[in-house]
Image (cartoon, coloured by chain):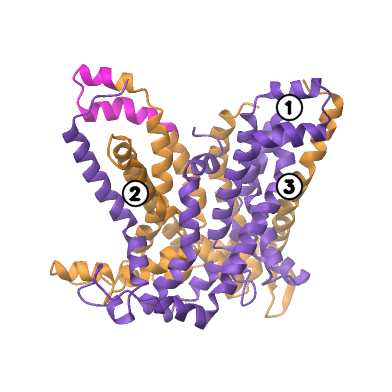
């Protein structure tokens, strides 16, 4: 039964919720607005909210001075590569755990999750050393592999929970009809699993894009993604508000848009099925 | 029904993921353990041999250890209290009927998608700058003296920034839990004349308790290792050096790998204690 609500009550709810929502969103909104101001307008006292001379100048300067496109490409490569690689490794594992569970499946799943709890700083030096020895410090490949490994448990878990929702009877029917394992996966399972795989790709791309421990510690000039690019603004360029805003907006815009689509998966992906 | 054939195929399919994660866990862990028992200064003489538990004792007895533990606890505790309390309020608010619910949800969730270095820098410069920051303007507008946020109120500032980042996560999970609440039970209580506070305390809060526990556990694991927020704002100065940051400084800045590794082992043990509780809850909910 839907509760009957007076229009008045609904209007009040709406007003409060929108105020709170805009308040929480304000830092992002302010950053986007400031990115279109001149430096002088960005620090105007009192602050100018909307009525300034909109300019794209900051975006041009940021790109020109620091080669934004290279950092963007590094981010896309590392986040995209680690996610795709992770899903390729995780799909067979999640498939077998969901459809051919054994007594140890639960233990394996929990153990995988526990590797995610390992604090990164505790293994910082070993990874750093291995990277130096292998000559992959400050390389996109090295970072891609590390981010794949730290997100692999989440990828396996998400895929597992999605695969569990696919009715096993359908697979059995296919098997009865004489479908080989390969055909079973290719023609029966994959079409049903695609929405789950897509959600997994999406959320893990976002997590990898925003990862800011390994990306800051294992890169320098060559492989630095956007997280490190922004960190380089910490001083003194950060005091040029308009340029900082332009750089920040460019770093977060793609993910804000993807995030919009992934809000439902967020709960599933980050609580490991403990909240439904 | 699984046949013998499909069982061995299943094992084979699991192998890459299991082997990779096993390697990822064991190799660095064993190396950290190994270094933690040695005097190892890469830039000042390299590996100088076995020192037993020396590094463990020195890490704990160093003058920066207890302040770092205290800082860590204050930040984690502060962020947890703020995000859980506001998260419950926001979840209840977002569950109410209103116009534009979807848009408000997106506005509230958005901070979660902002990369940590961006949110830290935007807060540090555009909001907390004592001269040109928005908060300084706001304080001046009300005739107050602007606050030197990151130098004088450094811990509160970090807690504010991190809470802003994690509030969406808490809200979203609590909202999911609120939505599964049996509305008939609430209506019955309402008809019986139970005031809102009573309904909240006796029906809503118990229903949310599991979700709250999970938010606390998951956030604790992530919050124990926050790094970028401190790296770009204070660099560990002004009393914001957490345990994670202290270990980072020992290992990479002062290149004392032995000492840093001993600290790393402490951090791993600490995280595992929290993880143990989380795994128990997750495990209970898992039927394979």
Residue B201 located within the stretch drawn in magenta: yes
Task: State the mark number for residue A103.
Answer: 1
Q: For mark 2, what is the residue?
A: B82
The answer to which quarter of the image holds residue A242 is bottom left
Gap between marks 3 and 1 measured at Cα = 22 Å
Q: Position of residue A49 (x, y in %)?
A: 25, 68
SS class of the residue under badge 1?
loop
Residues at marks 3 and 2 on the same chain: no
Residue that extends furthest to the right in the rendered view of this protein: B5
Task: Check disc 3 and report its element: helix, strand or loop.
Answer: helix
Task: Tell me the shade of chain B.
Answer: orange
Q: Position of residue A227 (x, y in %)?
A: 53, 67
Q: Is residue A15 above or below residue A257?
A: above
Seen from the viewer's position, the closer of residues A59 and B219 is A59
Verify whether residue A213 appears in magenta.
Answer: no
**Badge 2, how many Cα within 10 Å: few under 14, some, many 20+?**
some
Q: Chain of mark 3?
A: A
Magenta stretch, main secondary structure class: helix
Q: Which residues are magenta?
A: B187-210
Q: Which mark is residue A186?
A: none
Q: Is residue B40 left or right of residue A234?
A: right
Residues at badges 3 and 2 in contact (C-beta under 8 Å)?
no
> Label 1: chain?
A
Describe the element under mark 2 as helix, strand or loop. Answer: helix
Question: On the image, numbered disc 3 is attached to which residue?
Answer: A89
Q: Which chain is purple?
A: A
| Chain of the residue under label 2 | B
Mark 3, other Cα within 10 Å: few <14 / some 14–19 / many ≥20:
many
Q: Is residue A251 left or right of residue A178?
A: left
């Amino acid at each position: 039964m839907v509760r009957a609500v007076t229009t008045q009550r609904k209007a009040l709810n709406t007003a409060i919720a929108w105020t709170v929502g805009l308040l929480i969103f304000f830092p992002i909104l302010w950053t986007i607005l400031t990115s279109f101001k001149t430096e002088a307008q960005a620090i105007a006292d009192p602050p100018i909210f909307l009525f300034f001379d909109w300019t794209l100048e900051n975006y041009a300067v940021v790109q020109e001075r620091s080669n934004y496109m290279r950092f963007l490409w590094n981010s896309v490569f590392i986040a995209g590569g680690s996610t795709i690689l992770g899903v390729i490794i995780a799909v067979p594992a999640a498939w077998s755990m969901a459809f051919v569970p054994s007594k140890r499946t639960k233990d394996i799943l929990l153990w995988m999750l526990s590797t995610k709890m390992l604090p990164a700083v505790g293994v910082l030096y070993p990874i750093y050393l291995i990277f130096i020895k292998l000559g992959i410090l400050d390389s996109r490949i090295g970072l891609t592999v590390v981010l794949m490994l730290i997100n692999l448990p989440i990828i396996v878990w998400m895929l597992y929970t999605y695969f569990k929702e696919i009715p096993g009877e359908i697979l059995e029917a296919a098997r009865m009809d004489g479908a080989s394992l390969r055909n079973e996966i290719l023609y029966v399972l994959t079409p049903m699993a695609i929405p789950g795989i897509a959600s997994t790709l999406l959320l893990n791309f976002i997590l990898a894009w925003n990862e800011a421990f390994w990306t800051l510690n294992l890169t320098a000039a060559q492989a630095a993604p956007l997280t490190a690019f922004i960190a380089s603004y910490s001083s003194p360029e950060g005091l040029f508000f308009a340029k900082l805003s332009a750089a920040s907006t460019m770093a977060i815009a793609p993910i804000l848009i993807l995030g919009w689509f992934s809000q439902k998966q967020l709960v599933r992906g980050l609580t490991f099925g403990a909240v439904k | 029904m699984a046949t013998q054939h499909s069982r061995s195929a299943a094992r084979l399919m699991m192998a890459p993921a299991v082997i990779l994660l096993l390697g990822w866990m064991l190799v660095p862990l064993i190396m950290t353990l190994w270094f933690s028992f040695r005097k190892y200064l890469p830039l000042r003489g390299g590996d100088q041999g076995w020192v037993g538990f020396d590094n463990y004792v020195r890490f704990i007895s160093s003058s920066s250890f207890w302040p770092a533990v205290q800082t860590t606890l204050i930040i984690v505790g502060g962020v947890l209290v703020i995000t859980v309390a506001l998260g419950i309020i926001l979840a209840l608010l977002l569950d109410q009927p209103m116009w534009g619910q979807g848009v408000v949800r997106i506005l509230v969730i958005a901070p979660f998608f902002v990369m940590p270095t961006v949110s830290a820098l935007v807060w540090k410069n555009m909001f907390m700058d004592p001269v040109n920051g928005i908060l300084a303007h706001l304080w001046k507008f009300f005739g107050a003296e602007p606050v030197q946020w990151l130098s004088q109120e450094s811990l509160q500032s970090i807690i504010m920034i991190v809470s802003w980042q994690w509030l969406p996560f808490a809200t979203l999970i609590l909202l999911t839990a609120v939505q599964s609440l049996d509305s008939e039970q609430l209506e019955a209580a309402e008809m019986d004349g139970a005031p809102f506070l009573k309904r909240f305390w006796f029906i809503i809060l118990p229903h949310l308790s599991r979700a709250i526990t999970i938010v606390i556990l998951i956030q604790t694991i992530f919050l124990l290792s926050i790094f970028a927020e401190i790296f770009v704002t204070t660099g560990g100065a002004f009393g914001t050096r957490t345990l994670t940051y202290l270990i980072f400084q020992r290992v990479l800045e002062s290149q004392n790998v032995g000492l840093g590794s001993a600290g790393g082992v402490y951090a791993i043990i600490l995280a595992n204690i929290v993880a143990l509780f989380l795994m128990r809850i997750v495990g209970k909910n898992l039927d394979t």
